[in-house]
Amino acid sequence: MADVYFKYNPYKLETVIRYNGKDISPDSKLYPYRGERLQVWMDRLVPIVAEECNDDNIHLTFHGTLLDYEDLQGAVAEESRDGNISFTLEHVEAQETDDKFKELVELFDDMQQGPFDDLKDENIVRNFRKALGSEFEVSVIATMSSGKSTLINAMLGQELVPSKHEACTALIARIKDVDGMQGFTAVGLDDDRNVVYDEQPVDLERMKQLNEDERISYIEAKGDIPFIQTRKANLILVDTPGPNNSRNLEHGQHTYGVIKNDAKPLVLYVLNATQLATDDDNNLLRKVAEAMSVGGKQSKDRFIFAVNKIDEYDTERADSITGALDNIRKYLAQYGIENPNLFPISAEMAKVIRLHRRGAALTRKQEKTLAEYDLYTDVSQMHLTQYAVLPAARKKAIEQLALAARERGDIYGETLIHTGLPAIEEAINEYLDKYAVTAKVKNAVDTFRKKVEEKRMLGNLLREIEDNTEEKDRINARLELVEKQLGEGKATASFKAKIQNLSFEDEKQEIKKLRSKIDTMLKGKVDQKMTVTAIDQEMARLIRKVDHLRNDVVTEMEKLVTDKLRADAERLVGEYVGHIQSLLHENAVSVDRFDVGSATFILGDVPDAVELIDRHKRQEQEKVGEKWVENTNKKIYKPWTWFQSKGHWTGIYEDREYVDGTKVFDEYLKPVRGNFYENIMLAERQMDEQSKALKQFFLNELDKLEGVIKAKVTELRALTGNSKALEERIRDDRTKMQWLQDFLLRLDSILEI
């Protein structure tokens, strides 16, 4: 039997792998993955282990968190089904995130009581609290009639988000979780994020009014979202309007931006089980497939597909939930979405039960829905949790809750679990714990580590000065060299030149390529003679293409204009900081991360398609058939008519309405293309303008950094040149150094498992 030891630290993204007690060699296919997130290469892990062990029986010991172990269990189970190798698994438990948050807060309190005043300033306090309080968004997206608002209300446990067709969300609503808060409050903001409606308590009726207020583009709400288990998530539910249902273009682009976001926020995509293959779904799912194809398991995990209205299938007759889900998998596979995270649900039943359990008054229709609970309790096929894509242990735990509810006679509690909604909520919590919370712990540690490291390095430097006169002279010589370079400007000149010479020609070429993408998309099947019905249908397709293309192209341009600029400039500044640190002493200088604003593009109004069609209508006489016309002149008493025909066939003509489709398309697309092309030119101009502004921004930062270094050099020279002050500083630092060493040991331990 082969013995494999596997240790994974999700905070430091470090992996240790041993085969039969020996570390894997650099030749192993797993070797390059040791510094990456486990979920990025989980699908390759078990097959490679099986290949490299070359043994029919493999014992795999995993040292890590429970969530990561459950992922490994799933990967092993899949490999075992497909192969001939027998796996046994052993889990060595790791410290989970709850304890680490407690340790972080205790450490921060100790730091504020410690001997270093610099570690107590407002920036340190603010940055640490910001790191621990960082927010994580779950964006809920869907096209029309999917039940998105009903699902959000079911999660909230009350009706807050309007769900009527005429009042559905046309703006972006963010709902922040605040544990223990009674009710909800909201602020209404305009396009520029100015307050239109001050923070006040809100209910369903008030939210409808906010939705209908043309001045409001964003709603910032807050309240207790019951299914979030702890404060550490700081979750925000984002109710995102459909791309074709938004009040302005920026809202439609928001949906595409969420899908493409490199930070991998969680996306809850609501599908209507009874109405697939809409044009809007088709366009969005193509973008989802692209996002899921990059980044391994996390890119797949971040998309949860809620298959709503599954209860509309008649499971007591011929309909099968399993068959319906198989069809949905085939449907999503058309877009390249393989093995999606499907969660069949009945959002309406879940919402009604939660309303009933909190004592809310139900409508007659809701009372009728509630009365149908037995569909879920009595029909095993409607126990929807069984179909959820969850680790077996978590699914079993949820199903045990349903069994316990049945045993104590809680019919609505049992039904709620069978609606499938608790399974989705468990998946969201699992994603937060697995990805968002581990990253938050790491960010919180890193936030004040740099300051602490700076102080430790300075203390080490001073001790070296005390113990070694030769070292003191060497440091003096180094400081003189740095001062000389700073005085001559050589230390920054080469880096300033690099920043000034930044070139973004490749990005400009990518922007130009968008033109061919636009031309390819903006095509239709039209000719000079078309019926009104045919041109109506073709124009409807074209308008949908234009809407989705506008969102897609704009988000692509914004990424091209901002991301490369930021990445290149920050890389160069990082090089400069590293150079100065090497001259002074390791981490004696630290620089905060720079923030660069984003470019914005706006595509104007499009022509009125109905007006264009009306303008190019024309009437034509068209033969629609024939009729027999009798020769009434032919009579028996008229011998000269005997040889005439009895009659003849003549054509029947009617006025028919046609449209010149080529002219309608040309007149519609001319300003649309012009609008796109104008924004492409604008993107190129903004690339140049932001390039100049960004260069100047970083050049200013380099000047400020140079000033910081000069001040630090002056401080160190004063210390090395004044023996009495140096001795006094050293005595003080001996006490501080012990505190620092203990503190850093505790800090390091937080990131260990």
Image: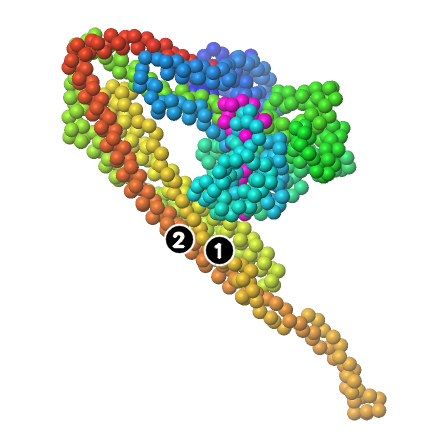
Asked which quadrant contains residue 321, the reply is top right
Magenta region, residue range: 223-244
Q: Toward the viewer: 198 or 705? A: 198
Q: Regarding mark 1 in the picture, which secondary structure is present there?
A: loop
| N-terminal label among 1 and 2 | 1
User: Magenta includes 347?
Assistant: no
Q: Regarding mark 2 in the picture, which secondary structure is present there?
A: helix
**2 on left or right of 33:** right
Q: Position of residue 469 (x, y in %)?
A: 16, 9
Q: Toward the viewer: 231 or 47? A: 231
Q: How is the image coloured?
A: rainbow
Q: Quadrant of the N terminus?
A: top right
Residue indicated by mark 1: 606
Residue indicated by mark 2: 678
Q: Amino acid at mark 1?
A: Val
Q: Amino acid at mark 2?
A: Glu
Q: Toward the viewer: 742 or 170? A: 170
User: Magenta includes 235?
Assistant: yes
Kindly tell me whether residue 44 is visible in this rendering. Answer: no
